[in-house]
Image: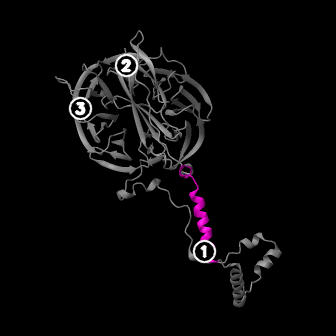
Amino acid sequence: MSSVGDEVAWSESDGIVKLAKVVGNDLNIITTINGPSRVNEIILRGDSLYIIDEMEGLHCFGYDGRQQWTYETGAGGRKLLRFDKYLAVLDSIGRVHLVTYHGEDYCQNPVQSNCALISSAQQKLLVASEDGIVKCLVEGNESWTRPKRGDLGESITAMGYSSQGMVIIGREGYAIVAGDEEALEMELWSGDKLVQRHDLNARLTAISSNENGTWCGFDNGDISKLSDNNELTTITNLQFPIKSLTAYDDAVLAACWFYLYSVDSDDIRWQIEHQGMPEFVCTDRENNFVIFAGEDQNDWTNEEPIGLINLNEEVYEIDKSDLAIWYQEKSAIPQLTAEEIYREDDSVANLLTKEERNQMDKAVDVGLDGLMEELGHEIVNDDIGQQKIDSSQLIDVMEDGIQSMALFDEDELLGELGETINEIILPQADAGDDKVISAAKDGKIVVLLDGGTSFDPQNRITRWSWIESSGREISTSKKVKVKLSKGRHSFELRVQSGEGNWTSDVLSVIIE
């Protein structure tokens, strides 16, 4: 959504990007763009759209749909962040590129490699590597570094800033070890100084803050608020993992499962149900509107709508079963009254010639005797059409038919029956054979993960998903390039058929 909330852009699964004008409570499409491949993120700035796709990288389009420039990363784009002077692009093999709004390198790219997560606030870029190292970059220059903890490794689950300007880092250790280290923790940093550490019962998945407070979401459904003295207080539990948080005014929008909630410091303020699982949530700068979208991951249902909420409207109470009324289809056929059905309507007569109108006005008089006579004709004709067949002749004909059927070969009969059945063959995921690869001089190498050998004789695969060992989805394409360091790496390929069935296969890659 644009900063003033008057335009909205979204991408669809086939790479199509649509730009719409917000008019009242409606979205009027003004431009449609055919993206080069599946689009992962969009940013609106001025009269331009900046998009990243899975195959090429960063593209700039005008509001008229014309492409202005392309910046190829060599590995597509996974995440896109906006700064005053440049855009930050995280590609699919973990490299971070800083690109000007004219499509040129802002500095020597890439500014970071082996990156798993990026975040931004206050014109600062936070980058987290696969091994748990977090760096703060200002215009491409390193400001400070948070070293990794633990000998067995860790992963960064979320990063963000508090309303006090401190960096919040959620971490998950790969094992519980002796000492002061716990498996799940939240750290607060002021520059390169660790201010406080909270032990957690669940994984930190989302962070959002504004001048009114800092909100944290967890994979057990908890919504917590961080106080000015860095105390973490649980406000409510939404029962499902928190997908995203968006702070606005004195509350926060929380997306989880098929619902979007507004939560304040006391409890849930309001909620709404969506046909899909809300994955994309954004507001305008003044927090007048919120727009949200997501899919239900079922290819046999209708397309999921885009929701637009005016945050200035008053909240009202309805039954929970009515939360989905806004997107449910309503009958487009008006119900007619008895007067409308049986009224005399001469509007058709205006379309006829004078001679045709005279014939239409003539009454057709058919008496009861005439109708009975016609019915009698039909009965007589029916009697004439009947034939008398001797019962012995009928039995002979039936016996001849049975003997003819007995002459058919049993295998031929079964074969013909089999040809009439359209058998559904479900696909099977195949991540390929396990690999042992030698690393380059720097101890790293780019590896192609290819699910193209998956068994799919009827082209029924509708969704691909590559999952790394931490459980994070790294791609939704058949093929993906990953940059790996020395060690053992595990990847899971999941494929979904049009019937909604999932199968998976695991691939092990050893880098020596």
What residue sits right under mark 3 in the picture? 230
Q: Nearer the viewer, mark 3 or mark 2?
A: 2
Q: In terms of secondary structure, where does tag 2 sit?
A: strand
Q: Are marks 1 and 2 in contact (CB under 8 Å)?
A: no
Which residue does the image show at 58% across and 61% down from the upper left? 403
Magenta-colored segment: predominant secondary structure: helix
Q: Position of residue 79 (x, y in %)?
A: 45, 29
Vertical placement of residue 269 versus 390, above or below = above
Q: CA distance from mark 3 to mark 1?
A: 69 Å
Front residue of 2/114: it is 114
Vertical placement of residue 295 versus 90, above or below = below
**In this orientation, does residue 210 appear?**
no
Q: In terms of secondary structure, where does tag 1 sit?
A: helix
Front residue of 249/397: it is 397
Q: Nearer the viewer, mark 1 or mark 2?
A: 2
Amino acid type, callout 1: Glu
Front residue of 123/182: it is 182
Q: In terms of secondary structure, where does tag 3 sit?
A: loop
Vertical placement of residue 360 versus 415, above or below = below
Amino acid type, callout 3: Asn
Q: Which residues are magenta?
A: 390-414
**In this orientation, does residue 389 appear?**
yes
Judged from this view, the residue extending furthest toward the top is 441
Q: Residues within 10 Å of mark 1 (few under 14, many from 20)?
A: few
Which residue does the image show at 28% across and 19% down from the upper left? 148
What residue sits right under mark 2 in the picture? 510
What residue sits right under mark 1 in the picture? 340
Vertical placement of residue 411 versus 128, above or below = below
Q: Position of residue 21 (x, y in %)?
A: 55, 43
Q: CA distance from mark 3 to mark 2?
A: 42 Å
